[in-house]
Image: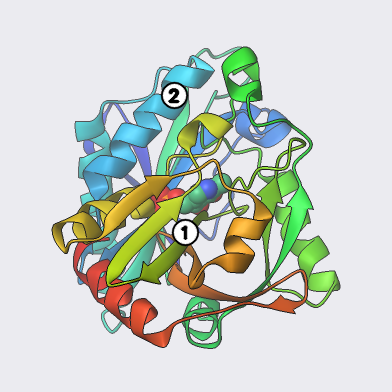
Amino acid sequence: MTVLVFLDPAHADGRVADASQPQLMISDLGATRGDGIFESLLAVGGAPRKEQAHLVRLAASAEALGLAVPEAEVWSRAIRTGLREFAAVEPDREKAVVKLIATRGVEGAERPTAWVQVAPVPESGRRQREEGLKVLFLERGYDSTVAQRAPWLLMGAKTLSYAVNMAAIRHAKAEGADDVIFTSSDGKVLEGPTSTVLLAHDRDGVKTLLTPQLESGILAGTSQGALFAAAKEQGWELGYGPLEPHHLLEADAVWLISSIRLLAPVVSLDGQEIRSSAALTAELTELVDRFV
Ligand code: PLP
């Protein structure tokens, strides 16, 4: 079941509410315009993973939208309340998804609506990590320099406007695939609808991990950031795009990484089987389990 905690100035640790009952005003701009931001993070054994990185990104998204959201400390307390309640109702679940959501609030109120929800981790993630992902390249429709020219497009912010991302995944599923990698109109590899793209080379004893460069208007993945830091410690070389589809087809392995599904290998791109490496996946999964 889902636990719900509203951030409420009258309740220092957050106000627990009944997630099975209506709780949001129909004039909330998050509902009527998708005007808001969110984060999804994993909790293991009642402890949130890389909480700071998510709170920093939430603050950056809020800044991009001009949203005055509560301080990190207030979110932290509500997260703890949510995880405590979740452990009480779901004592056998080791892992949970923690969502942080802030909208522009009820129309005219000039005050954001903010809440934390804690729910079970979907079962599909484990299967996709084990079986790998069939991925389609789909156009995002922007060029890779638009983020710098057009900040109002909110390219690097994690906004609630995910209808397009979800439609892309539905399109992939209708075509018999599992997931998507977006490409820019100038032919660069961007990101998945809910994940960051990684690829590896293992040549002459040198292992290199690459990801598209942030300036291409993608979300800064907290999982990619944490994995890169850990891989560097282990002697991996790191690289940042620009990447094109042929780089993925030529790589020794490609993955999509994100906070809840974690590291999932890509097994085909546009129907073409690509190289994968059980050894590299195992090595990186061990780092993910410890550091992501
Ligand atoms: N890119 C997009 C568009 C996402 O929505 C997400 C996460 O949902 C990611 C990348 C991966 O980010 P993280 O590793 O912080 O979960």
| Camera-nearest residue between 24 and 204 | 204
Q: Is residue 4 visible?
A: no
Q: Is residue 252 above or below residue 92?
A: above
Question: What residue is shown with label 1?
Answer: 198
Looking at the image, residue 229 sits to the left or right of residue 117; the answer is: left
Q: What is the x, y in percent for residue 16?
A: 34, 49
Residue at point 62% right, 77% down? 274
Residue 87 lies in quadrant: bottom left
Residue at point 68% right, 60% down? 180
| Camera-nearest residue between 195 and 41 | 195
Amino acid residing under circle 2: Ala
Q: Is residue 199 above or below residue 139?
A: below
Q: Is residue 99 above or below residue 130?
A: above
Q: What is the x, y in percent for residue 79?
A: 27, 49
Looking at the image, residue 112 sits to the left or right of residue 191; the answer is: left
Residue at point 21% right, 66% down? 46
* Residue situated furthest front in the rendering: 204
Amino acid residing under circle 1: Leu
Circle number at residue 62: 2
Question: Is disc 1 placed on a helix, strand or loop?
Answer: strand
| Mark 2 and mark 1: Cα distance apart in space | 27 Å
Looking at the image, residue 80 sits to the left or right of residue 4; the answer is: left
Within 10 Å of disc 2 (Cα), the crowding (few <14, some 14-19, many 20+) is many
| Camera-nearest residue between 177 and 91 | 177
Q: Is residue 284 visible?
A: yes
Q: What is the x, y in percent for residue 240?
A: 43, 43
